[in-house]
Image: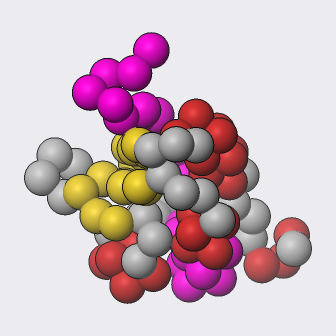
Amino acid sequence: MNDDETLRRTVTITNPQGLHMRPITAFVEMASRFQSQVFLSKEPGQRINGKSPLALLGLAAEQGTELTLETSGADEQEALNALAEFLANVRTEEEL
């Protein structure tokens, strides 16, 4: 199942407000709980550290943006599942 020791999944941002500061902060807090490395990319060559709030903000992930989530490390499958679920279900502030 491992491809070069890295797991990948594509996730589409559905939140009308996109990936803004509040969900970015929550994502980074969640990602930091895992031992695995976490990376996100919006397009080839734009691979960023998923544990860096500034890097995530720089992705400018609006509604409809497809992101590739990559995890590698001791708990990579658990990290991939939890973080992909989080990204796919980011809610608007009104829904929180």
Question: Is residue 65 something one can see in this rendering?
Answer: no
Q: In front here: 31 or 54?
A: 31
Residue 29 locus on image (x, y percent): 63, 74
Name above or below for residue 22 compared with residue 96: below
Res 68 quadrant in image: top left
Residue 2 locus on image (x, y percent): 39, 21
Question: Is residue 82 something one can see in this rendering?
Answer: yes
Residue 8 locus on image (x, y percent): 41, 34
Residue positioned 26% across, 27% down in the render: 4
Q: Image check: 23 left or right of 12?
A: right
Q: In front here: 48 or 63?
A: 48
Q: In front here: 22 or 47?
A: 47
Tell me if residue 80 is in the magenta stretch: no
Q: Image check: 96 left or right of 87?
A: right
| Start-end of magenta stretch | 1-27
Tell me if residue 16 is in the magenta stretch: yes
Residue lying farthest top? Answer: 1
Res 81 quadrant in image: top right
Q: Quadrant of the C terminus?
A: bottom right
Q: Image check: 64 left or right of 4?
A: right
Name above or below for residue 8 compared with residue 45: above
Residue positioned 45% across, 44% down in the render: 73
Residue lying farthest front? Answer: 74
Q: How is the image coloured?
A: secondary structure
Q: Quadrant of the N terminus?
A: top left
Q: How many marks?
A: 0
Residue 44 locus on image (x, y percent): 16, 46
Residue positioned 12% across, 52% down in the render: 45
Q: Image check: 77 left or right of 39?
A: right
